Amino acid sequence: GNSVTQMEGPVTLSEEAFLTINCTYTATGYPSLFWYVQYPGEGLQLLLKATKADDKGSNKGFEATYRKETTSFHLEKGSVQVSDSAVYFCALRDFGNEKLTFGTGTRLTIIP
Amino acid sequence: NAGVTQTPKFRVLKTGQSMTLLCAQDMNHEYMYWYRQDPGMGLRLIHYSVGEGTTAKGEVPDGYNVSRLKKQNFLLGLESAAPSQTSVYFCASTGLAGVSYNEQFFGPGTRLTVL
């Protein structure tokens, strides 16, 4: 079956630091990959996505590249801000499957 | 557009009581989902629906029932609440076409406590 493994948190960084949150996946087909973000007290919202190998998703300074050879979709940002403090979820959706498979989430805290 | 809305936002139940959580979306989406979120476990799919009048079981369906009588609404029922059902419940929806194809839109969540 499908599964998503992401780095365990919590992660605490200083403002303007470089961020990497690791995500690897197992899928039976050719999945689309997603990063969702959950701000305190809110539902999840899509941050970025990639639908095929070597695609790069980007949004709000965050980037992630779909690496089929390493089955990875690591989230990166060059300079984090306090407002980036949230829980980040990696997820996949296999082709032809209407369901998402989520990782367990990584809580990120940015300190000024 | 309101997107995905959920009612109520908070609820406290006693063991054995029943309740229904309502999810509504105004985006004409075909697919709708109910998840529960527990600390350290991410989101787990309870039930989902691929269209009006259809429902299917997800990863953790026991103790829950659902109905999708109208395309825009997806109801989650707890017939006899148990403390293990204390969680935050999220509803989501997905369309089959357009720029947001393949994206799930989430509601703000319902925090349920079962004593």
Image: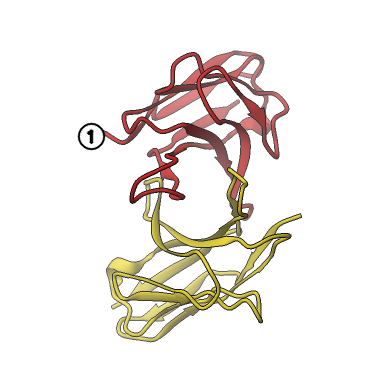
What residue is shown with label 1? B1
Apparent side of residue A1 relative to residue A95 in the rendered image (left or right): right
Q: Is residue A90 visible?
A: yes
Name the residue rendered at 44%, 16% in the picture: B70
Instruction: Give the tally of numbered discs.
Output: 1
Q: Amino acid at mark 1?
A: Asn
Residue placed most toward the observer, B32 or A80: B32
Residue B90: x %, y % from top left: 48, 38
Residue A18: x %, y % from top left: 39, 86
A77, above or below B59, in the image: below
Residue B86: x %, y % from top left: 59, 33
B28, above or below A92, in the image: above
- The quarter in which the N terminus of chain A is drawn is bottom right
- The quarter in which the C terminus of chain A is drawn is bottom left
Q: Which chain is red?
A: B
Q: Which chain is yellow?
A: A
